[in-house]
Image (spheres, coloured by chain):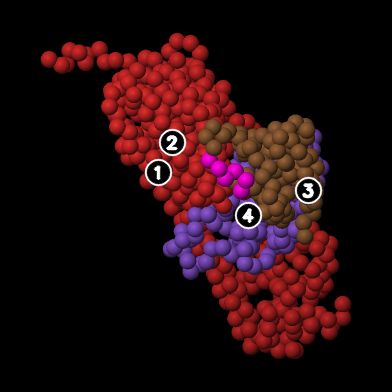
Amino acid sequence: MGALSILVGQEQGHAPVTVFEIEGDIDAATYTELQDKAAEAIEAGAANLLLDLGQVEYMGSAGFRAIHSIANMLNTEQKPGMHKSEHVKLLNPKGEVARVIETLGFDSFLEIYDDRNAAVASF
Amino acid sequence: MVQVFELSVESDLGNLKAIRSFIKEAGTSLGVDANTVADLCLVVDEAVSNIILHGYADHVGRIDIRVASNRQDLTIRIRDQARKFDADDVETPHLDESLQDRAYGGMGVYLIKKLTDEAEFKPVPGGGNELRLLKRGVVPAK
Amino acid sequence: MKFEEKKKVLRNCSFLSGLHDSILASLADHSSILDLEAQTPILTKGEDGSNMFFIASGRVKVHDDDVVLAYLGVGDVFGEMAVLDSGVRSASVTTEKRTRLLCLEREDLWHVIAQSPDSLRTIIASVLQRERDIVKDVTTRTAQLQAYEKELEIGRRIQADFLPEYIPEVENWEIASFFEAAREVSGDFFDVFEFGPDGYIALVIGDVCDKGVGAALFMTLFRSLIRATCQLGALNHQIASKASSEDHIRQILQTSIDSTNRYIATTHSKSSMFASVFFGVLETDSGKMIYINAGHESPVIFKRKGDPVILERTGGVLGLFDFARYNIAATKLEKDDLLFSYTDGVNEAKNEAGEQFSDWRILQAGASGWSDVQGLLDNVLSQIKEFRGRAAQSDDITMLAIACLGKSRDKAKSLV
């Protein structure tokens, strides 16, 4: 039903990183696709997830809720001194998406990169 | 001068994209700047998503959206015919809904609050509800 | 449109149901056809009306200015009220799309009825049914509005009940607060309490994202968690001497915020509820204060000497991510310094041009001086109202402030 396409790839930094290349709009109709894809990857053993938002034109609160639930899925240990999520990071959010990340304060909790290599190396 | 744009859709999540396009077209043709137009698309999307997921949770209905400019101000009215409040139930508002369900709107409501100047919700004649969103000073003077 | 078709349209209207076929024929004879394009006004509220309309095809909207009251389609009738009692139009009617109407003049209707008195009974029954439908709609609408208002009222009541019953009186310090709920929003809260050993005051101000009863309920949760974890923390630590109490206070503050965040983030993660909170603990003897600013509007200390000090954020909001970390920062209030904290209902108050009150107007209010803390709050409030003008207040307004009055000069003398 959704007009959301998610390309799953594997990269290697200091640890294996699963990269989601997302294209399309993430709204209340399509956010479950992102959540389900992430759950699938986690079940298959993914421990680190990089969400490439470079081709995402629109992301509403539904998308943020998906990211919120994915981050909680992957950050299960209580590590003292943890500041931002070590297991879920964002790449290249653009325009309005980047502005809403700031409005919701998600930039306090998730690292955001504009360079794919730097992002992968950070895990 | 008042300019009006209207759209009527079925309460289906699949229509959200068309609604965003409608708002983008309406805002752009009024000369509203791109960032504000993007904010308005977001706000309307959040409001309509809430209506579809909550108001029309167990039935289908129509959603009417009306964008109107009045001098430099922009008003968006979103009308639904969802019957959330039962006339027989006046004395006992739905406090028994779990905290999670009740708070579902969370981030969406926060964004609507932050990105509009006024957001007023009320039941209207003929059944249903109306959400009126106001953004001031965004329509350039001609 | 042929005679037979006209009669069919009339027969299709429930308003005329029960009328004899010969009456319908007579009405068909006297009625005229009106074809209209979309968005064409037919009736205007307030005007005199002498004709009524039957919809053969298309759609119209009944409205009062830009408030739509109803949509009518094939088989519906409008305009009959003015025809029957020689009154003015009670609403406006405009076509939605291309519409074909049958139009009947008042004299023709009465002429037809006069020829057949029985038909009058049918017309009256229809009118009464219409009245009953209107009454039912108004009753339902009123009930809906009342139910909605009641929910909002409950939200505001819950919120008001959870504000501190009294603000502790602390020697050499003056504390004042202001709170005004907006119609729909009930997420702001503040708290002031003594805890732990003597000489420590907790100052909390927060804002739960959301509106209505949901926000109010989450607000009570945040406020109670913060208070409870604090009191529990204080109980758990045996504060032996003053020297170690500072570390303990730090630990209590850290644990309180961390556990509140974690509880909401894990137990209520589905609702994506979050709150911004400023939590400061003041050591009343020295004026030293440690604080956590979790995504909240930055409070400001107006100094007697020097520039105002902004207490910046030390972490993100509470309640979203249980791995989030919140740092503790420290500052100090000297004699005549005033700490002013507030929620976004203050700096984001908007006027009719869409401009925001902003931080700089807050700084300006402080810079112009104050005689007492309540006076400063009153000053800020009146400036907000003046700035806002006729624009509505769309968010809760909350302010909490504390000022250092310095050591009492008479204290030593009062003890003999």
Check disc 1 and report its element: helix, strand or loop: helix
Which residues lie in the magenta part? A73-78
Q: Which residue is mark 3?
A: A8
Q: Are marks 4 and 2 on the same chain?
A: no
Q: Chain of mark 4?
A: B
Q: Is residue C357 above or below residue A75?
A: above
Residue C288 colored in magenta in the image? no
Mark linked to residue A5: none
Q: Chain of mark 3?
A: A
The quarter of the picture where the N terminus of chain C appears is bottom right
Q: Which chain is red?
A: C
Mark 4 crowdedness (10 Å alpha carbons): few <14, some 14-19, many ≥20: some
* B8 with respect to A105 (left or right): right
Q: Nearer the viewer, mark 2 or mark 3?
A: 3
Mark linked to residue C255: 2
> Looking at the rendering, which quadrant does residue C71 occupy?
bottom right
